[in-house]
Amino acid sequence: MHDIALLAIIWASVFVASYLAHKTRLTPVLWYLFCGALLVNIGILPQIMPVFIVDFAELGIIIIMFALGFEESTSNFIKGIKRSWGIALFGALVPFAVGYFFADVVWQDTNTSLFVGLAMTATAVSLTMVSLKSEGLNNTPAATGIMTSAVLDDIASLALVAILVPIAIGETSVSVFGIFFILGKAIAFFIIVTFLGAWLFPTSNGFAARIPFLGKLNLRSVLSMAKGEYTVLSLLLIAVLVGLLAHEFGFHPAVGAYMAGLIIQKEYFDFHQNDERDHYKHAREIIDNVAFSWIGPVFFVALGSKLIFEASLFLSVLPYALILFIGLFVGQVLSAALAARYTGNFDWPSSWMIGFGMLGRAELAFVVLDIAYVQYNIISMEVFYTLMLVTFLLNLSVPLCIHWQKKNLKMESE
């Protein structure tokens, strides 16, 4: 089947998912995942997606995260980091411990246990943020707490991947230099993004204004080209470039795209005063449409297609998957919620929302599974399918729990 035909099928499923979401009053993300799983298991979508669909889906999550960062206030995000260290710490340690000790009891192999714990550590913030967006909760303190915690969580998880993988495959031992090098890369990335946001983009106001030629290339002048006709193109280019920069530093490009959205200020769109169009509002509307209506959903349909059912294998791993899922669900929600309440000083409804929001597993989990199962054959097929099923159940829980907890947030505010 032609790659374009596959894209047409995925887009058709987005229509179906959106209709079902409207009828059931559930977030569309849940139905995107369901449609992906259904289509791959009845043979309409291939088990291995072509590169075109994979790259298109990755572009979708980059634009989604840029759109979410674009709506967030930079000051709120920075304040959120100060409140979220405990959520990131305990919200990662507990899932790792649950995964590790469960695997140690069931499969009794140290390397398998390391990879199971590692795969279940990092939160898939993209799924959570889109679910919050669909419920109108993406600008709440809980959403900021989830995002900042997940960013810190990803930094720690990336460091663990770089440290534990060489140990598990027997290539090398841990060195102090290696650990500090990984942490240094993470710090360097955020310093570069901060520099772009604070000094380089608004060059007409910062120290870069004194630099010949560079001082004339501020972001406002780029956004205002041809009466703002290239504003959206400029923004998407920035999202992709910062995403690629994040990739070079070891992060998922979506994290970089979110940071790119954060550092773009509303004041940059204050041009063409005689133009009746609100360029900031217009750009947000277009980017939101691209992110949440026709490119972004492809990511979630493709994500759902990763769960392939093989009856005998499915039935054999189902008990293990359910036990691990329950353990991770309870451990993740309690650890993140209690940390949010007692280290971040969030109220209880927001704390529980943060706990539910930290349940998702996607990008880094699949990276770990690819390393452990595909590249080095460290884990068995049974372990692989167990983790895939657990990941799917955790992702399925996110929109359901957020939808349910939304009612409690409303009750608290009334």
Image (cartoon, rainbow, N blue to C red):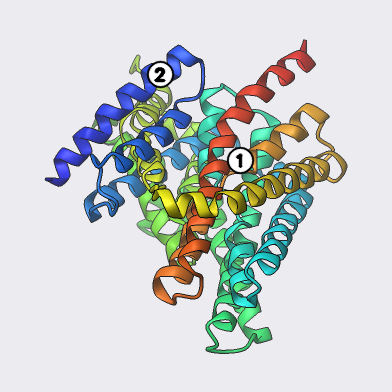
Q: Which mark is residue 20?
A: 2
Question: How crowded is the residue under tag 2: few (<14 C-alpha within 10 Å), some, or many (20+)?
Answer: some
- Which circle, 2 or 1, is nearer the viewer? 2
Task: Please give the count of numbered marks on the rendered protein.
Answer: 2
Q: Quadrant of residue 397?
A: top right
Look at the picture and state if 104 lies above or below 237.
below
> Residue 393, percent across and down?
55, 42
Q: CA distance from mark 2 to mark 1?
A: 35 Å
For the N terminus, the quadrant is: top left
Hey, which residue is sitting farthest right in the picture?
Answer: 342
Residue drawn where x is 23% and y is 39% of the image: 44
Horizontal and vertical percent for residue 7?
22, 39
One can see residue 199 in this view: yes
Q: Secondary structure at mark 2?
A: helix
From what the image shows, is residue 399 above or below residue 92? above
Tell me, for residue 74, which label it has, or none.
1
* Residue at the extreme left of the image, as rendered: 2
Quarter placement of the C terminus: top right
Q: Callout 1: helix, strand or loop?
A: helix
Q: Earlier in the sequence, mark 2 or mark 1?
A: 2
Location of residue 413 in the rendering, given as x and y in whole percent from the top left corner: 77, 15
Pick whichever, 200 or 141, lies toward us: 141
Q: Label 2 is placed on what type of residue? A: Leu
Q: Is residue 200 visible?
A: no
Amino acid type of the residue that numbered disc 1 sits on in the rendered structure = Thr
Left or right placement of residue 62 versus residue 117 in this view: left
